[in-house]
């Protein structure tokens, strides 16, 4: 079992719809959670960070965290063709040692149809 | 301005040559990472450092080596390049529980 699991997609949604991306993780001690967007041929860029249970909103993006169920999700409202990219979930399980690496999922490819 | 610098951005080199990919950061982060990514594929962690003189191999077996003599510098070396090393190499940094930030990457082609 991979430490961070994502459906590879592609997830196809029409323009203006809500895109829902999900991620599960295996380490119950994980402390911080991130969503990245990666356009083809580019480096991943951070779009959301979430550290506590519940929802965090930033513009059209909402990150949701449920530590009891070990999942984190990203909602994109009013999806635009420019949102078409691969979305990577990353989990930081570091607590006491300061030595754990950030762990990435394999990414979900999102396609927003005009 | 704090940033992450990778050089070169593009490199085409012959089989058997020694290569060093450079990664430097001005963010003061203690953790640095090297990822390998083929087009359309997932990120694979090949090397990780959590501080000066502290490095670990990642999940993907790699013939490359790294060093971390200074906090801001984390070079990756291939002693003898092969066509199978053709890929994009991404450097990233982080600290504590904060997110990682990526450099622009080095696209390597071994002919």
Image (cartoon, rainbow, N blue to C red):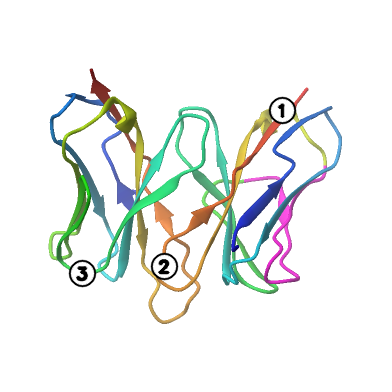
Determine the chain carrying the residue at label 1.
B
Image quadrant in which the C terminus of chain B is located: top right
Q: Is residue A36 above or below residue B111?
A: below
For the residues labelled 1 and 2, say whether their Cβ atoms are less than 8 Å apart: no
Q: Nearer the viewer, residue B24 or B67?
A: B24
Q: Which residue is mark 2?
A: B98
Determine the chain carrying the residue at label 2.
B
Give how far across and how far down residue A54 sits, in percent: 13, 63
Q: Which residue is mark 3?
A: A52
Q: Is residue A29 left or right of residue A57?
A: right
* Same-chain check, marks 3 and 2: no
Say what secondary structure mark 3 lies in: loop
Can residue B27 be found in the magenta stretch?
no
Give how far across and how far down residue B25 sits, in percent: 64, 62
* Same-chain check, marks 1 and 2: yes
Q: Is residue A34 left or right of residue B80?
A: left
Say what secondary structure mark 2 lies in: loop
Which is the main secondary structure of the residues drawn in magenta? loop
Determine the chain carrying the residue at label 3.
A
Q: Is residue A10 visible?
A: no
Task: Tell me the crowding category of disc 2: few under 14, some 14 to 19, or many 20 or more residues within 10 angstroms, Cα based.
Answer: some
For residue B11, which quarter of the picture?
A: top right
Task: Tell me the crowding category of disc 1: few under 14, some 14 to 19, or many 20 or more residues within 10 angstroms, Cα based.
Answer: some
Q: Is residue A14 above or below residue A47?
A: above
Q: Nearer the viewer, residue A24 or A16?
A: A16
Extent of the magenta region: B62-79
Q: Nearer the viewer, residue B104 or B18?
A: B104
- Tell us which disc is closer to us: 3 or 1: 3
Cα distance, mark 1 to mark 2?
A: 33 Å
Q: Which residue is mark 1?
A: B109
């Amino acid at each position: 079992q991979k430490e961070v699991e994502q459906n590879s997609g592609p997830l196809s949604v029409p323009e203006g719809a809500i895109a829902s991306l999900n991620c599960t993780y295996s380490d119950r001690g994980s402390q911080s959670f991130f969503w990245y967007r990666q356009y083809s041929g580019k480096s991943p860029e951070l779009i959301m960070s979430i550290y506590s249970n519940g929802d965090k909103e930033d513009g059209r993006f909402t990150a949701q965290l449920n530590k009891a169920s070990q999942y984190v999700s990203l909602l994109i409202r009013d999806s635009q063709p420019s949102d078409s990219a691969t979305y990577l979930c990353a989990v930081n399980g570091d607590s006491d040692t300061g030595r754990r690496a950030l762990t990435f999922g394999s990414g979900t490819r999102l396609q927003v149809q005009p | 301005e704090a940033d992450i610098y990778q050089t070169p951005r593009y490199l085409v080199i012959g089989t058997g040559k020694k290569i060093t990919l450079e990664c430097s950061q001005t963010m003061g982060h203690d953790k640095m990472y090297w990822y390998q990514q083929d087009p359309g594929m997932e990120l694979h962690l090949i090397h990780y450092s959590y501080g000066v003189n502290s490095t670990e191999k990642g999940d993907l077996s790699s013939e490359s080596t790294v060093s971390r003599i200074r906090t801001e510098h984390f070079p990756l070396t291939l002693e003898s390049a092969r066509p199978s090393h053709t890929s994009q190499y991404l450097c990233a940094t982080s600290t504590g529980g904060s997110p990682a930030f990526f450099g622009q990457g080095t696209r390597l082609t071994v002919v």
